[in-house]
Image (cartoon, rainbow, N blue to C red):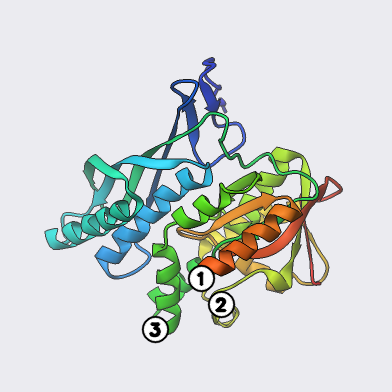
Amino acid sequence: MRKLERPHDPNLLVGLETADDAGVYRLTDECALVETADIITPVVDDPFTFGRIAAANALSDVYAMGGRPVTATNLVFFPCALPAEVLSAMLAGGQAALNEAGCCLVGGHTVEDDECKYGMAVSGVVHPERIVRNCTARPGDRLILTKPLGTGIIATATKAELASAEQVAEATRWMTTLNRQAAALMLEYDVSAATDVTGFGLLGHLSEMAQGAGVTMRLWLDRIPLIQGVHELIADGMVPAGCYRNRDHYRPQVSWAGIADALLPLFDPQTSGGLLIALSPTHAHGLLERAQMEGLFAVEIGAVQERGGACIIIEER
């Protein structure tokens, strides 16, 4: 299998090598371009809400890099069998999220497909010296998560009509919440590293952070926030296939002591998940205090330590 080679361009500041959330290309000494694209299948029934979620999901990668979204291009795969009103509502939802983000829609492309999919290519800007990477966590840092887990499990239960109205409403609220405010607060502190928690689940994205920085991440299981009723839905078999794929792929990098049954939510693929932020204990304390004052969700879930054994160690405190 041939590997993709990194382009020999000194202005490429972030490429493929550390599985970061977006690419970054330097335009000037004061400005770099943050580029990403993301496409998802529907996770809710309402097309307008799905559009908002898809846009929030795509914008999130720019926020995770410390950037400001500037322009977006719609990417649509749409079955001819569906009414045009569905497409219009979906695009309107995406536009609503862009408006909230202050990001300008500049165009789009539509492809006929058997399955509906929607996403965006998003471009943002960041100062070349203020890029936030996923591979630069430092021993001693604390880990903060800005949204609870469980959207993949609840989406699966929704399709089976087993999720309660309250669970659907809560998952939808989190998926439509932009990471804009969390990112803005993050940038007021000396952040070591960050990523957003999406398709690889918490443990998948944390594994990328650990491997990139050459450290071990220690998680406190009882601190990790879940959307209400997730464990009950797992007991009913409402686990997406992607959750099992994540578990099978990342399990060798995780060490735990007799708590394997409780780990499935940590492998759950998230849509428009929260930011996972690494920063010093002092700055973590300040961020958590500010988040509480401003009504933002933020929970300390673990710490970074020197590499020793597994990439991730999970314990009950």
Residue at the spot of label 3: 165
**Callout 2 amino acid:** Val
Give the Cα separation between the discs numbered 2 and 1: 7 Å
Toward the left, the furthest residue is 84
Q: Which residue is mark 2?
A: 230
Residue 86 seen in render: yes
Packing grade of label 2 (10 A; few <14, some 14-19, many >=20) is: many
Quadrant for the C terminus, please: bottom right
The residue wearing badge 1 is 153
What amino acid is labelled 1 in the image? Ile
* Viewer-closest of 33 and 307: 33
Give the structural element (helix, strand or loop) at label 2. Answer: helix
Q: Residue at 57% of width from left, 28% of height from top?
A: 1
Q: CA distance from mark 1 to mark 3?
A: 14 Å
Mark 2 and mark 1 lie on one chain; the one further toward the N terminus is 1
User: Tag 1's secondary structure?
Assistant: helix
Q: Is residue 147 above or below residue 95?
A: below
Do callouts 2 and 1 mark residues in contact (Cβ within 8 Å)?
yes
Which quadrant would residue 75 be assigned to in this image? top left
